[in-house]
Image (cartoon, rainbow, N blue to C red):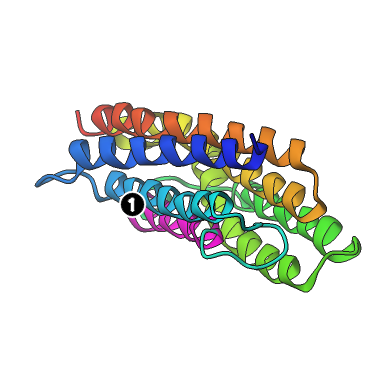
Amino acid sequence: MDLLLIANIIVCICAFFGFIYGGILFFRPKKALYAQMITLAMGVIGFGRLFLVCRILTGGEITETFQLGFVGMFASFLFFFSANYGAVDSLIDNSVNRSIWSKLTPFLAPLAAIILYIVFFIVRDTSLMWRIFGAMLTLNIALSTYFNLKHLLSPDIDKGVVTCLRPYNLLALIYAASVLVECIGLSSGNTILAFVSGLISAISIILIIPLIERGVKRWLI
């Protein structure tokens, strides 16, 4: 069976599990908006992967032309970004005296994503489609991972919010790296690299909602 099909099916199943599980847990009155935004990210990932699965099953290829399913890859990072920036970041910045280095260090995550994009999508002979999609993906990853790394490294604040959410932020960084590497594999025709990266994405996805449940529960105690 096609390795890309297997990887996308696994990611799709894991994402919909997270979406359904998160929906049951968090879409209730007085539940954290933070958790709801991340749950919506799971849904976006799941539907995006479902489109890719359908494309492959109907005899199409997903490496030569832009696919609707790719939208799920980069759009999910907008929800991750909105969750951290909108719900938590103001608490951290208002509660902690941050040095200049603590403000600059989080830029290492988006910088790494931009460097990978330049090396594998610009310097290397890559199609225009992958250069455009890679730019869209990298932009969204850069926005999201800046706050993931910032909240991972920040000192804790009242109620232990930062400590509660550190496992999620670490996992979100791993997921972002796996998605970018997966697209590098797809754009270069390296099916094995895309397959392995897809499996790492799936493992990350299936762990995110349980970690958010644990973190938010400790946060609200």
Image quarter (top left, top right, bottom left or bottom right) of the N terminus? top right
Residue stretch rendered in magenta on the structure: 70-89
Q: Residue placed at 52% from the left, 59% from the top?
A: 69
Quarter containing the C terminus:
top left
**Camera-side residue of 5 and 170:** 5
Where is 84 relative to 213, above or below? below
Tell me what residue is drawn at x 40 percent, y 58 percent: 82
Total numbered badges shown on the rendered structure: 1
The residue singled out by tag 1 in the image is: 40
Question: Secondary structure under badge 1?
Answer: helix
Predominant secondary structure in magenta?
Answer: helix
Asked where in the image residue 181 lies, by quadrant, the reply is top right
* Snapshot quadrant of residue 134: bottom right
Q: In this view, does 19 lie to the left or right of 139?
A: left
Mark 1 residue type:
Leu
Above or below, 209 against 137 in this view is above
Residue depicted at x 29% and y 31%: 213
User: Would you call the spot at circle 1 few (<14 residues within 10 Å), some (14-19), or many (20 or more)?
Assistant: some
